[in-house]
Image (cartoon, rainbow, N blue to C red):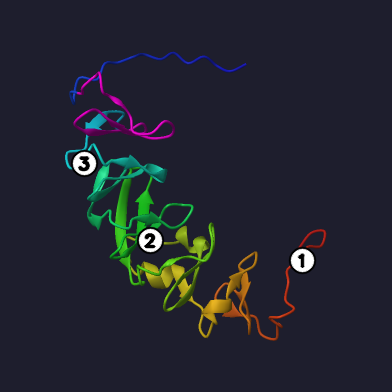
Amino acid sequence: TDEIVETKLVPVKNPKVDITSFESVKKFFTNYYRDKSNIYYYDADFGKELKKLEAADSNSFVSLEADFGKDNRNIYYNGNKLEGVNSDGFEILDENAIIFKNKNNVYFLKAKNEEKKYKLIPLNFDSSSFKPVHKRSEYFKDKNGIYYFDYSNLEKLDTEKTEDIQNKLFFKIEGVDVPTFRELQFSYSKDKNKVYCKNKEVKGADAESFVIFYTDDRI
């Protein structure tokens, strides 16, 4: 049987909210709330308190995935405004919500979840054309090429010592035919001419006939 946990209701005294209009910004899974005048963030993990977002516009604010939010001007993460990041064209690009863009830049968000701290690092990609090859893809593309994103390097990455995120995580596929490129499985991909594993060409593989198939215990 499930254990019954005692709970205690505690009135919110600071900041003051308008009780009659106070509501969740969206129906499920959000830490953002609003009343008729303001936006609030509830830190359920650490501070366990409701805080007012001074810069947020209540009328245009929307709650997004992974504790992001936006209004008609700014982007917010964990209830904090991301300085210098305009909300125009904002789009989260990966399932971990650590790569995103607006109309001006592409960004990498290195978060320390145990402290709700983060470092925001601009990436040198073409923002207007940068996107994943498909949803949940290991590959990204812009007008200049195709890039393999090595998720395995995230655990080894120390952003306190280096901000060279682009060269540590994104690896360009040299000589790829962008229009015919398609991702396969298990970090394999191909275009009309070559087969690739991650960002490296698989020498001798025939692109036209190359497929991935399964045996009992391996591919």
Report how many numbered discs are placed on residues in the image: 3
Dot 3 or dot 2: first in sequence order is: 3
Question: How far is mark 1 from mark 2, CA to CA?
Answer: 37 Å
Q: Looking at the image, which residue is at 42% across and 79% down?
A: 144
Dividing the picture into quadrants, the one containing residue 212 is bottom right
- Find residue 196 and name its label: none
Quadrant where the N terminus sits is top right
Q: Is residue 29 magenta?
A: yes
**Which residues are the magenta region?**
17-46
- Find residue 213 and name its label: 1
Residue 27's spot in the image, x, y percent?
41, 31
Q: Main secondary structure of the magenta part?
A: loop
Q: How many neighbours does mark 2 have within 10 angstroms: few (below 14), some (14-19), or many (20 or more)?
A: few
Residue 21's spot in the image, x, y percent?
26, 23
- Element assignment for label 2: loop
Residue type at numbered disc 3? Ala
Residue type at numbered disc 1? Phe
Q: How many neighbours does mark 1 have within 10 angstroms: few (below 14), some (14-19), or many (20 or more)?
A: few
Q: Looking at the image, which residue is at 24% across and 28% down?
A: 35
